[in-house]
Amino acid sequence: MSRFYFGGSDTSDSGDDNLPFPKPLSRAAFLTPDFDPNTFLSSLHNRHQTLEDLRSELQTRSQEINKELLDLVNENYQDFLSLGSSLHGGDEKVEEVRLGLLGFRRDVESLKGKVDERKQEVEALVKERKGIRKDIQTGRALLHVNQRLQELEHRLMISSDGANKHTKDDEDTYEPSESEEESDGEYGGSMPTSRLQRHVQLYSYIKQMVAHIGPDHPYLINQEERILRLKQTILLDLGGALKQTSSAGGQAQGRLMKLLTIYKDMGEYSEALKVLKERKV
């Protein structure tokens, strides 16, 4: 309920004497968590109070709060002293905690060093394992190359040291398989084109394996002469078949084209042209 401020009996009946007396500022207004001075002052626009009166009231409230704070400290001064006494010796506790933390830090760093060392060992073992696995794969590939070399040497009837294993008994006992039987026949006892093609396929496969492994491998370097003998033997068989076929005339055109295709598959087409030129001469 608003109160009214009345002057003495000798005062005039002015408008200011009839204004309502403002309520005291509430302490709760200053205790809000989001207290903002500007917002607080703007909320006082309906107070019938001059700015000077408001400033005076705020100063009075500030003095009251300071006095209350001082009274609170005086009342609890003994408790503050007791609290200081109870905290006596805390430095030793803090030092113990600090030393404990330092020891824990050293232990952690030691464990970290061991973990890093173990990590390096594992990485080295993994790298070594990869190297061993690669060597095993390379070894298997080299064995495979050697098997294919032996197979081609057996088909060409030559030994790994270059000796010709072809004998009269081989000629008497050799019978071409079904895949080697051709409709174009054998000209002058020359080898069937299917068999020649199989030889070239094996030779090309060996060359691909060598390129895949790497021709600079010591084992493959030692096999270069062996591979060269196989190439020369195949070219010799192809050359003999091509000469005999070219002498047969037009009736052997189909076989001639097959032989040229085999030369091309081997990458020796220029050698076929050379043989044909020599034949014409």
Image: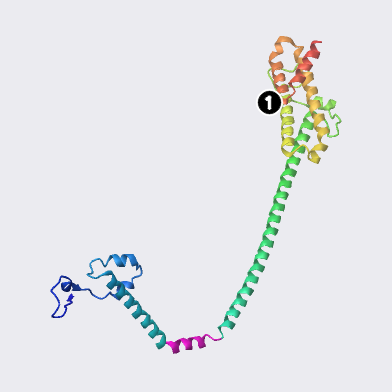
Asked whether residue 77 is drawn in magenta, I would say yes
- Number of on-image labels: 1
Residue 243 image point, x, y percent? 78, 15
Q: Is residue 180 above or below residue 123?
A: above
Q: Nearer the viewer, residue 22 or 211?
A: 22
Q: Which residue is mark 1?
A: 179
Q: Is residue 273 above or below residue 59?
A: above
Write the residue at 74% across / 28% down. Answer: 199
Q: Is residue 24 shown to the viewer in this render?
A: yes
| Horizontal relation, residue 242 to residue 85: left or right | right
Write the residue at 28% across / 75% down. Answer: 26
Dominant secondary structure of the magenta stretch?
Answer: helix
Asked whether residue 102 is drawn in magenta, I would say no
Residue 246 image point, x, y percent? 75, 13
Residues in magenta, as a range: 76-88
Q: Is residue 165 above or below residue 61?
A: above
Residue 93 image point, x, y percent? 57, 82
Q: Nearer the viewer, residue 131 or 50?
A: 50
Circle 1 — which element?
helix
The quarter of the picture where the C terminus appears is top right
Write the residue at 81% across / 36% down. Answer: 223
Q: Is residue 136 above or below residue 148?
A: below
Task: Name the quadrant containing residue 79.
Answer: bottom left
Write the residue at 14% across / 79% down. Answer: 10
Q: Is residue 184 shown to the viewer in this render?
A: no
Q: Nearer the viewer, residue 76 or 114?
A: 76
